[in-house]
Image (cartoon, rainbow, N blue to C red):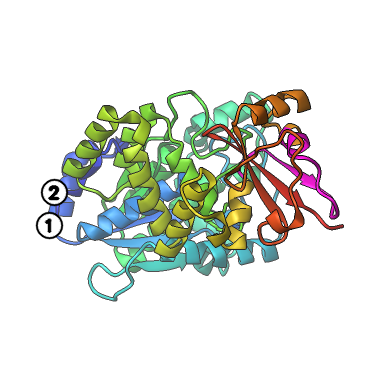
Amino acid sequence: MTDILDDLAWRDLIAQSTDLSELRALLAAGPVTLYCGFDPTAPSLHLGNLIQILTLRRFQRAGHRPIGLVGGATGLIGDPSGKSAERVLNTEETVAGWVERIRGQVSKFLDFDGGPTGATMVSNLDWTGPMSAIEFLRDIGKHFPVNRMLARETVKARLESSGMSYTEFSYVLLQSMDFLELYRRHGCRLQTGGSDQWGNLTAGVDLIRRVEGGTAHALTTPLLTKADGSKFGKTAGGETYWLDPDLTSPYAFYQFWINADDRDIENYLKVFSFKSREEIEALIKEGAERPAARIPQRALAEEMTTLVHSADETAAAVAASRALFGQGELRELDERTLASALAEVPRTEVAPGELPSVADLLAASGLCKSKSEARRAIAQGGAYVNNAKVESEDAVPSSGDLLHGRFLVLRRGKRNIGGVEVVRS
């Protein structure tokens, strides 16, 4: 067993803890069972959730036993933490479907070998569903003083603005009951989560003390922020990067890490990578010496895309990235990968039939501000179609130039990529 707390501290992955010295002693005494919960509020988890999944994985690799909890019950309610308005409640059928999808996503990161550190997956609907309202109020509700619940920051903020229903007000009771049930059923002594969950985590610790007279611990990770002030795990347009390849393609996922700001990459490596401290420090040094090569970004992009998707998807993303910039053969890319790559760049759609001129396509895609600017780019030798230099200002692509019968890759200069797709109605 390794000292997981020292590793987490170096990676800046400890925001709050109930008692680090007691937790350190507990972890040193033998395998500790811990859990983290994931509510099915969407059909997939996202990059922010990945921090918590990988934290469970780090504990397991350090010799401890993780439990991944999917909120089949709490997902029907919705956590009010960090929300300025009431959530829209999803149907039971929708939530049940999302539970299974998220169960599968979390499971792929953990080892279920059945040994003392073998992981377990649970749904809190298993113990919440059979409980009557009277049982819940008598056995759980009586341990929650209303004055303390009203003092919670999440509650105060909502009461001062849009208000809060009793449904969301009761969420902390449900999550606390989860910790109590896992303490009873699995001897779970530690709950982890993001720092916005601190109040929910400590409420569970307190419930275990009140009901069972037992000692449990809570540990949170900081909420990750970007150096430029924008939200982590979001596109420039505010869209979320999901772990599901049908919602965020492996190519787009790979590009997220490749495009990481130099100011953020060291933090990202610490938080997400399983490389050692020495390996990470060496990558950061190389990145500082040759920033244009983006060495740490490429290392993290390959590690994360392989971990979340597969080595084959990583290889396809790398090949697409190289081919788009003239360092590989575009015709060797499979249709799905090429479509994913072009979805990430400025592009235009055209109807079947005779294709417009290259100058028209450069302007329509946004790579050039106007057709006249596009013609100048061609004249100066800076325009490419499928990585072939365009020689004539009046050049028109042929149907034979279409990749997979529907795509053209445009490039202006060395770095500006655009796309064309033939769309059939």
Dot 2 surroundings within 10 Å: few (below 14), some, or many (20 or more)?
few
- Asked if residue 189 is positioned above or below residue 110 in the image, the reply reads above
Amino acid tagged 1: Ala
Amino acid tagged 2: Ala
The residue positioned 39% from the left and 58% from the top of the image is 306
Is residue 42 among the parts visible in the rendering?
no
Q: Looking at the picture, tell me which residue is in the foreground, 401 or 333.
A: 401
Provide the secondary structure element on which disc 1 rests.
Answer: helix
The stretch in magenta equals 344-362
Which label sits on residue 25? 2
Query: Which quadrant: the N terminus?
Result: bottom left
Q: Looking at the picture, tell me which residue is in the foreground, 362 or 94.
A: 362
Q: Looking at the picture, tell me which residue is in the foreground, 264 or 192.
A: 264
Q: Position of residue 67 (x, y in %)?
A: 36, 62
The residue positioned 42% from the left and 67% from the top of the image is 121
Dot 1 surroundings within 10 Å: few (below 14), some, or many (20 or more)?
few
- Mark 1 and mark 2 in contact? Answer it, CB < 8 Å: yes
Q: Position of residue 286 (x, y in %)?
A: 24, 34
Residue under pointer 1 = 29
Is residue 342 among the parts visible in the rendering?
yes
User: Residue placed farthest to the front in the image?
Assistant: 392
Which label sits on residue 157? none
Q: CA distance from mark 1 to mark 2?
A: 6 Å
Q: Is residue 310 magenta?
A: no
Query: Which quadrant: the C terminus?
Result: bottom right
Q: Is residue 351 magenta?
A: yes
Q: Position of residue 86 (x, y in %)?
A: 67, 39
